[in-house]
Amino acid sequence: MRLLSLTALTCAFLFAAGPEYDRALELYKHTDYEGSLGVLLPLPEKGVADLALMGQNYFMLGDAKRALDLFQQAVTAEPNNSVYHHWLGRAYGRRAEMGNPFSALGQASKARQSFEKAVALDPKNSEAVNDLFEFYLEAPGFVGGGLDKAERLAERIAERDAAEGNYAHALIAEKHKQFRNAEKYFRRAMQLAPHQVGRVIDLARFLAKQGRFEESDRTFVAAQKLAPDAPKVLYARAATYIETKRNIETAKVLLEKYLASSLTPDDPSRADAQKLLRQVSGG
């Protein structure tokens, strides 16, 4: 699923009182998930925001089962909270990825239902909309996915954010193997949001998948110039090299630099980076 937004998190939990919550949230923002839990777990009385933040910490630590339980409690306490339904959907989705084939179907269906509920409660919850779009794009029809649904949602996304809408249409074109159209949409998204380094990364990774390595490398250089030493650029370039089986030594250096960077929950996890590094190091 797409990487996580701190904006929705902060806006949803502004009402949370107490220095413990504030301290736990700050630790979460700096990816110290165990430290954040260390602040929240001893609290004798936990509000719904505390429960939700605990769920996010467990989710980021890979404990989807505990995260799911906490998000269910949060949704029960505040059934009209779009953000809580969205996180519940993410937890169901993670459980579906990790579970056996029989339970995964039910978990995936519940993920879709939670995403749809989050979007129905707040159509402006862009992170929920994007995760629902990705579900429609990737999931099979028997659990509620489908390109027809993804296409309709892409139109809605475009109404809200033209660059994101073009990105969504690029992914759909890729699914249809309409690569010339996909490139057109990726480039248009980059033109519409020239200061968003993620748009440049999207194009660079697409070009690499098409075997256009020199163009991809030039595009990554442009991304680095736009956001020097941004962790997401380091990770994306390393992952692209590894996926295309080239420049492996450079990929190792990029991953080591990434692991030494100051990360946020919006960045790929250190665990993912370490996994890639072990993959190319033979560990």
Image (cartoon, rainbow, N blue to C red):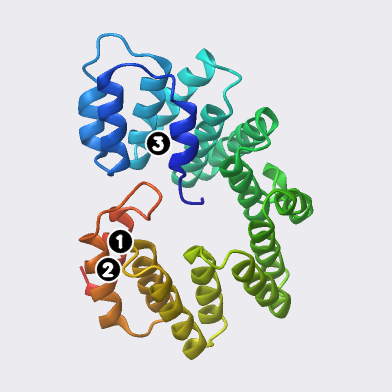
Viewer-side label of 3, 2: 2
Residue carrying label 3: 64
Question: Helix, strand, or loop for circle 2?
Answer: helix
Q: Which of marks 2 and 1 is nearer the N terminus?
A: 2
Kindly identify which residue carries mark 2: 255
Distance in Å between CA atoms under marks 2 and 1? 6 Å
Badge 1: residue crowd in 10 Å (few <14, some 14–19, many ≥20):
many
The amino acid sitting under disc 2 is: Leu
3 or 2: tag closer to the N-terminus: 3
Q: Nearer the viewer, residue 108 or 57?
A: 57
Is 278 above or below relative to 22? below
Structural distance between the alpha carbons of marks 3 and 2 = 26 Å
Kindly indicate whether the residue at mark 1 contacts the one at mark 2 (C-beta within 8 angstroms): yes
Indicate the secondary structure of the residue bearing disc 1. Answer: helix
**Can you give x and y, in whole percent of width and height, for residue 103 in the image?**
53, 37
Q: Earlier in the sequence, mark 3 or mark 1?
A: 3
- Quick one: 75 or 262, which is closer to the camera? 262
Q: How many marks?
A: 3
**Which residue is under mark 1?**
273
Q: Nearer the viewer, mark 3 or mark 1?
A: 1
Residue 118 location (% of width, % of height):
62, 32
Q: Quadrant of the C terminus?
A: bottom left
Residue lying at 48% horizontally and 47% vertically, measured from the top left: 97
Task: Pick the residue in front: 66 or 33.
Answer: 33
Query: x and y percent of residue 8 in the render?
Result: 50, 36
User: Residue at 51% of width from left, 13% of height from top?
Assistant: 77
Q: Which amino acid does label 1 sit on?
A: Ala
Q: Is residue 202 left or right of residue 42?
A: right
**Rendered view: 197 above or below 91:** below
Helix, strand or loop at mark 3:
helix
